Amino acid sequence: MRKQRTIQDFQKMKAEGQKITVLTCYDYPTARIIDGCGIDMLLVGDSVGVVFSGYETTLPVTMDEMIYHTRAVVRAQPKALVVADMPFLSYQVEVAEARLNAGRLIKEGGAAAVKLEGGGNIAATIRAIVDMDIPVMAHIGLTPQSIHRMGGYRVQGKRDEQAEQLVKDAHAVAEAGAFAVVLEGIPRALAERITAEIDIPTIGIGAGPCCDGQVLVIHDILGLCEKYSPKFVKRYGDARTLMTDAVQQYIREVKEGEFPTEGHSFS
Ligand code: KIV
């Protein structure tokens, strides 16, 4: 039987060169399906705000929304480790508030770990949360909550000084006690260097093939997102066409009296 994933497993997987698979997940039925496929980690990402709620950015997502979606995923009793994103403004203002909000995602949401965006600037907060025995996954590079500073969703670390800063950030979050770090939207050679230099697993998204693991947004791999498809996404299915065909057939059958039949009726 597949056993429950722990943060220690991910450390071991890095040491053994086994790739770590991660997908975002925001609801119960999807968690049942993805977990049944054997995924290692489910990330209740604040990308929920964009792909599920239809916001333009992740910035409006609230703690209550994150707790709601985390609970739905946890109710599926996945074997995968469930990591919940800390939304914008839930950890940046005061360390005490960050600890409280991380605790809510564990206590009320049922997550096993939290993720927050930032490098050296947020290392003290990571340390403070880890000191409460809450595992933290860090996230550096293209950090969507910093969209206004970055001037859009742009690849980070292309210039030498920016790349050096990202290497420092990766070391800072590892030293602060993060159990893993997401590397988003950075050149592949930089991701390879960071992966070789730090002891904790790197989880790439738009960071090339040399990270210890990979994360993608479930809506992107299923072709459910019509808004925007970044270069680093690979579409593994076309759920949009599947849904469109099914719904069009349903509409036609109801209109034409083909459904419901006697077989779908009670006597
Ligand atoms: O919110 C999210 O889905 C994420 C991943 C894309 C890493 O942070």
Image (cartoon, helix red, strand yellow):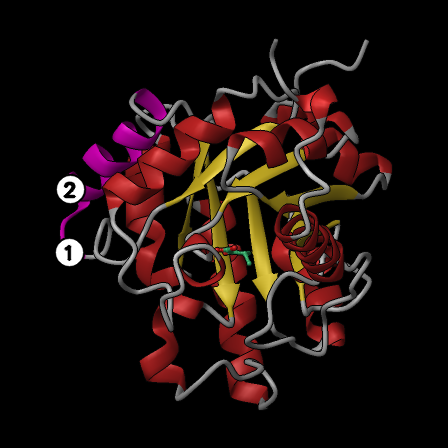
Kindly identify the amino acid type of the residue bearing the numbered disc 2.
Glu
Which residue is at a point 57% across and 79% down the rendered structure image?
163
Residue 80: % across, % down: 64, 27
User: Residue visible at 49% across and 20% down?
Assistant: 75
Q: Is 178 left or right of 36, judged from the image as shown? A: left
- Where 179 falls versus 144 (above or below)? above
Under circle 1, the secondary element is: loop
Q: Position of residue 211 (x, y in %)?
A: 74, 57
Are dots 2 and 1 in contact, CB under 8 Å?
yes
Query: Residue 164 at x, y = what percent?
Result: 55, 77
Q: Which residue is mark 2?
A: 97
Viewport quadrant of the N terminus = top right
> Is residue 3 something one can see in this rendering?
yes
Percent x, y of residue 148: 32, 82
| Residue that mark 1 sits on | 93
Numbered badge on residue 208: none
Q: Which residues are magenta?
A: 93-107
Circle 1 Cα neighbour tier, 10 Å, few/some/many (<14 / 14–19 / ≥20): few
Q: Is residue 79 magenta?
A: no
Residue drawn at the location 75% of the way across and 65% of the way down: 192
